[in-house]
Amino acid sequence: MPNLYLIEIPESVEQIDPECFNSCLHLEMYKCGIKHFKFLDLSKIKLLILNDEVVKICQADFYNLKNLQSLTLPDEI
């Protein structure tokens, strides 16, 4: 999957293998929930769309998103 740029992780996903996206060199856009952050290399995320099921965020949730350029929040936040 070397040409994968965007991935959508539904809220129903409970666990992701830590090496799952290692071969996705261009992957920098994610649609996911905050609960998925612990499985991802946050320093690679440039565009983030939070799933609609996310209803609360904290400043600490975004601490390691060092290269984040764009953030889309759900309407409920």
Image: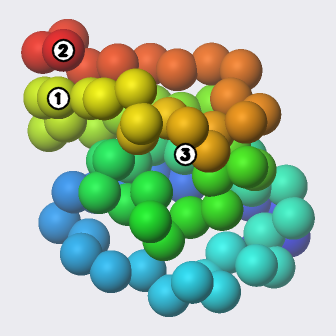
In this rendering, would 28 be left or right of 56?
A: right
Q: Residue at x 17, y 66 (%)?
A: 12
**Could you tell whether 49 is left or right of 1 in the image?**
left
Q: What kind of colouring is applied to the model shown?
A: rainbow
SS for tag 2?
loop
Residue 30's label in the rendered image is 3
- Whether residue 56 is visible, yes or no, is yes
| Quarter occupied by residue 10 | bottom left
Reply above or below: 30 against 69.
below
Q: Quadrant of the C terminus?
A: top left
Query: Residue 8 at x, y = what percent?
Result: 45, 52
Q: Earlier in the sequence, mark 1 or mark 2?
A: 1
Element at label 3: strand
Q: Is residue 47 above or below residue 16?
A: above
On the image, the x and y values in percent for residue 60 come to 42, 36
Q: Would you say 76 lies left or right of 28 here? A: left
Q: Residue at x 38, y 60 (%)?
A: 36
User: Residue 69, located in which quarter of the rendered image?
Assistant: top right
Alpha carbon separation for disc pair 3 and 1: 18 Å
**69 vs 45: above or below:** above
Amino acid on which disc 3 is placed:
Tyr
User: Label 1 vs label 2: CA separation?
Assistant: 6 Å
The residue pinned by badge 1 equals 56
Number of labels in the image equals 3
* Residue at 75% from the left image edge and 50% from the top image edge: 44
Question: Circle 2 is placed at which residue position?
Answer: 77
